[in-house]
Amino acid sequence: MPGRRRVLWVAASLAVSVLGQAPTKAWTPPKTPDGQPDLSGYWTNITLTPLQRPANLANKPFFTPAEAAAYEKETVERNNADRRDPGTDADVGKAYNDFWWDRGTKVVSTQRTSLIIDPPDGKIPAITQEATQRIAETRAAARGHAFDGPENRGLSERCLLWATAGPPMMPSFYNNNYQIVQGPGYVIVVVEMIHDARIIPLNGSPHLPKDVRLWMGDPRGHWEGDTLVVETTNFTDKTAFQGSSKDMRLVERFTRTAPDTILYQFTVNDPATFAKPWTAEIPMHQAAGPLIEYACHEGNYAMTGILSGARADDRKAAPEGSKAGGK
Amino acid sequence: MRTMLTSVIASVIAGAGLLLSAVPAWAHHAFTAEFDAKKPLKLRGTITRVEWINPHSWIHMDVKNPDGTVTSWMVEGGSPNALLRRGVAKETLKAGMEVLVDGYQSKDGSNRANGRDITFTDGRKLFVGSSGTEAPDERPEK
C-alpha cells in the first residue's frame, strides 16, 4: 500500500474506532483450499456516499454520526421516487414507485463523505484539454442521431453492459450485487446487472496486444499479501468511466478486512483524460445470495418502445403531407 | 462509427449522472424516451399476466371501457430482482387481481404505460414505500 494511502487508511481505521465499531486489525482472513486469501461469496457495494465530496462538506473527509444520519435522511428523501410531479418529464423519469428501487439508505461504513480518497479533496482531478475535446467531438457526432436505431442506444439499454458494472465497480440504483468465485489461477467477479462475468487470470501472463480491446478491459491479477490487485487495460472507446479514454489503466485492490467486509479500492490512471491519477474506495459487505438471474434481452420491450416513440416524434415533427418516420 | 460514438455518449452521460449524484433520471433506460408526460392516464383493470423479467417487469391487464368493450394494456415496472429479495412472490401480484395504475402512455400511442403508482383497488398499497428495507447495509449494527 503506498505511503499516502496507508496514512489515509490508518486515519479511516481510527475514525471507525472512534465511532465505536470493532477494529478489524486482529482478524485473519480465511484461505481457500489452494491457499489464496478467500474473497469468495456474495457482496454488495450499495451506498449513498457520493463519488465526489459535496461542496458543503469541503475539508470534511469524515461524517460525524449525526452528520451521517442527516445526510442519509436528506438523500433518501431527495431520491424518493414516490414523490409526484404530475404531467412533467421529471415525473415520467422517476419511472416507478420507490419500492422497485434499491439505492440503500446508509453512507459507507468508514463514514467517509466521498468515495474518492485521493486527491484528498475528494474530487476527480481536472480533465485534460485532450479529453474535453474528445468528449465534445463525441457529443457532436451523436447529436440528432440518438434514436436512429438500436445500435445508437446505450449499452445498458441494449442489455450488453451495465454502466456501473465496471471495472471499476460502482454503486447503482438497484441490484448492487456481485459474486466472487475463486479457483486455482483465476478469480471471477460476476455482476448481477446484465449478468457479466469478469474472468481475472492470476498466472502472470502479459496483457493482450494493444489492438485487442474488450468492453470490460483485459484484467490480470496478483496477490500482494492478502490483497488481490487487478490491473486492467485494453478498454474500448464504447465505454467511458467519468469520461475516461480507452487507454485507461485501472488498478483495483480487494482486501478482506472483516468476515463480512471487502475493502474495494481502485485507482484510475489515464493521462489522456485526467491531470493526475485518482483513487476511490468502497467497503463491500456480505450479501444474501444467490445472484438472481438477469436475463435481459428476453424482456427488453423497452427498446422497441423507445424507438417507436422516437418514430412517433418524427412523424409529429414532419411537415404536413410528407412521409416521415423510418431511418 | 456514428453508432459507436453514440454509445460512448450514452456512457459519458451515465458517468456525468453519477458525477452529479443527484436523482437519476433513468432506470435501465430513459423513461422519457418511451412514455409521454403529456399523456397521463389512470387505469383500473384486472391483471391477466405478469412477466417477472429483466430488465423490466410487465403487468398485462384488461381494462373495461364504458361501452362494455375491453382493452388490453401493458404496464412497465422495474427490475423484479429487488422485489424478489424483499419477499415479493409471484402470488403477490397475479392474474385475476384488480389494480389501479397511475402512469403515462407510450409515445407511440400503443396501449402501453409506465406504472408510476400501482395500487390495489381496496386501498392496500402495492409497491409503495421506502426503498432498501432489506438492503444488507441496513442490517443492525453488530
Image (cartoon, coloured by chain):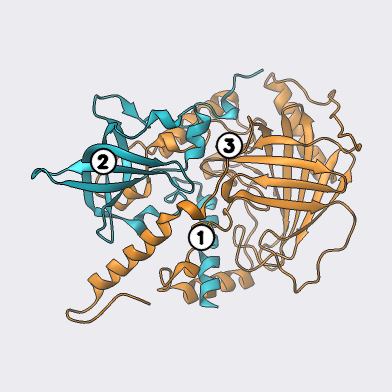
Task: Indicate the quadrant where residue A97 lies.
Answer: top left
Crowd around label 3: few <14 · some 14–19 · many ≥20 (10 Å) = many
**Mark 2 = which residue?**
B102
Task: Give the foreground label among 1 and 3.
Answer: 1
* Measured Cα–Cα span from mark 2 to mark 3: 30 Å
Question: Which numbered marker is on residue A47?
Answer: 3
- As drawn, the chain in cyan is B
* Quadrant location, the N terminus of chain B: bottom right
Please indicate whether residue B44 sits to the left or right of residue A248 in the image: left
The reply to whether the C-beta atoms of the residues labelled 2 and 1 are less than 8 Å apart is no
Mark 2: amino acid: Asp
Task: Give the foreground label among 2 and 3.
Answer: 2
Residue B103 percent location from the top left of the image: 28, 44
Question: Which numbered marker is on residue A158?
Answer: 1
Mark 3: amino acid: Thr
Parent chain of label 1: A
Mark 1: amino acid: Arg
Residue B30 percent location from the top left of the image: 41, 55
Please indicate whether residue B5 sits to the left or right of residue B112 in the image: right
**Residue occupying the point 72% across, 31% down:** A261
- Farthest-out residue, bottom: A322
Is label 1 in a helix, a strand or a loop?
Answer: loop
Parent chain of label 3: A
- As drawn, the chain in orange is A
Crowd around label 1: few <14 · some 14–19 · many ≥20 (10 Å) = many
| Residues behind callouts 1 and 3 on a single chain | yes
Residue B136 percent location from the top left of the image: 60, 28
Please indicate whether residue A192 sits to the left or right of residue A85 in the image: right
